[in-house]
Each structure stands twice: as structure tokens, then as C-alpha cells.
Image: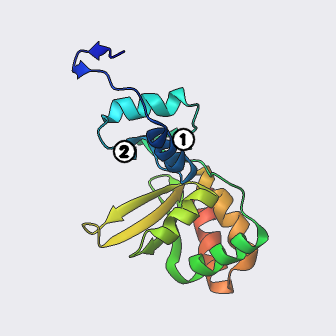
């Protein structure tokens, strides 16, 4: 039986399409990036919710308005923490800007940054017209990340973290 909607005939969801949505959910794809060939964004998003899939996207508001950040998808192991500390030591930085702490890691290839996002939350953004990507955590998410990494960092990076965390205290 074929039903029709305002945009033409309605097509039943296929198991392969559901599997694609489940795969996207397992890999932390944000709602705005859902993509099922032959389906509209809104249809994909509705099916995503109908299947009971959870997106780790949450909204946190600050003084500058709403900022889209993501919650962590899984808890990091000790091995993950040591890996993240090494990457943060070499490619990361922390600053106090716009009334909030921020932790950032920059890379050309975003794959590593998506792993950070799964472990610690935050966002991955393309910068410099897609030539670079940056993982950013801000506010309480950044404070938690920085305090977790602190004992695993060198003295120089620990000083940077102390400066970042104490800048907002005054």
C-alpha cells in the first residue's frame, strides 16, 4: 500500500536505511549532518528519533548566546587519557576567552579530533576554508578536560592550564 504526502508518494523506510542511521548514531554524527540518500533531512531526523537513537548534541548557553556543543559519547580508558594527553601536549592549547575557558586541538585530518569529541565532548570545526580542523571544548567541559589532563602534562603545559583556569577566578 502506497501512501502519499504533500510532496508526493510516501516511501517506506528500508532496513538498509535504518542501518545507516544506526551507524551514524554509533559514530557520533550530529543531527545536522544526518544523510540518507533519497530522503530529506527532516525525514532522516524524524526516523532517527523514531528508532530511539540518541545524538550526543546538547545546547549550552553562555553570555554570548547559544553555542552548540556535544557531550562525550563514551568514557575514556587510562590508555585513552594518556593518548589524549600526548596529543594535547603536542597539538593543543588552552586559553581564557569570551568569559570562558577553552581547550583546543588543531589538525589537518579531523579523524583524530572526532575521537577527542567522542571521549571528551566539545565540537569539531573546519577552519581556514577546510584546510585545518579544530576540536574545541569550552566552559565546564574544558575545565573538566584540563583538570583531567593536568597531571599527565609537562610543566610548561601545566603552567598554561593553570593560567587558563585562574584567569576567570578573579
The label nearer to you, 1 versus 2, is 2
Residue 95 coordinates in the image, percent (x, y): 51, 66
Q: Which label belongs to residue 166?
A: none
Decide which of 64, 26 is in the foreground and name it. 26
Q: Residue at x 44, y 40 (%)?
A: 17
Decide which of 42, 107 is in the foreground and name it. 42
Count how many numbered circles sit on residues in the image: 2
Q: Which label's residue is closer to the chain start, 1 or 2?
A: 2
Q: Which label belongs to residue 55?
A: 1
Residue 19 coordinates in the image, percent (x, y): 51, 44
Please give left or right for residue 75 compared with residue 67 in the image. right
Q: Secondary structure at mark 2?
A: loop
Residue 59 shows in the view: yes
Q: Neighbour class for label 1 at 10 Å: few (<14), some, many (≥20)?
A: some
Residue wearing tag 2: 35
Q: Secondary structure at mark 1?
A: loop
Q: How is the image coloured?
A: rainbow
Give me the C-alpha separation between circle 1 and circle 2. 14 Å
Q: Residue at x 51, y 30 (%)?
A: 49
Decide which of 168, 89 is in the foreground and name it. 89
Please give left or right for residue 24 compared with residue 155 in the image. left
Please give left or right for residue 96 compared with residue 169 in the image. left
Q: Quadrant of the N terminus?
A: top left
Amino acid at each position: 500500500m502506497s501512501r502519499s504526502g504533500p510532496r508526493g508518494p510516501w516511501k517506506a523506510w528500508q532496513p538498509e536505511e535504518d542501518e545507516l542511521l544506526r551507524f551514524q548514531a554509533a559514530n557520533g554524527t550530529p543531527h545536522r549532518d544526518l544523510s540518507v540518500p533519497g530522503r530529506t533531512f527532516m525525514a532522516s531526523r524524524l526516523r532517527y528519533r523514531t528508532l530511539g537513537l540518541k545524538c550526543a548534541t546538547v545546547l549550552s548557553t553562555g553570555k554570548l548566546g547559544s553555542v552548540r556543543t556535544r557531550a562525550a559519547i563514551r568514557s575514556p580508558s587510562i590508555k585513552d587519557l594518556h593518548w589524549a594527553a600526548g596529543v594535547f601536549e603536542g597539538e593543543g592549547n588552552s586559553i581564557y576567552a569570551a568569559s570562558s575557558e577553552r581547550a583546543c586541538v588543531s589538525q589537518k585530518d579531523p579523524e583524530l579530533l572526532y575521537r577527542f569529541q567522542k571521549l571528551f565532548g566539545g565540537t569539531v570545526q573546519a577552519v581556514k576554508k577546510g584546510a585545518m580542523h579544530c576540536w574545541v571544548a569550552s566552559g565546564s567541559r574544558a575545565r573538566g578536560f584540563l583538570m583531567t589532563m593536568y597531571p599527565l602534562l609537562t610543566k610548561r603545559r601545566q603552567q598554561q592550564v593553570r593560567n587558563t583556569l585562574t584567569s576567570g577566578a578573579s
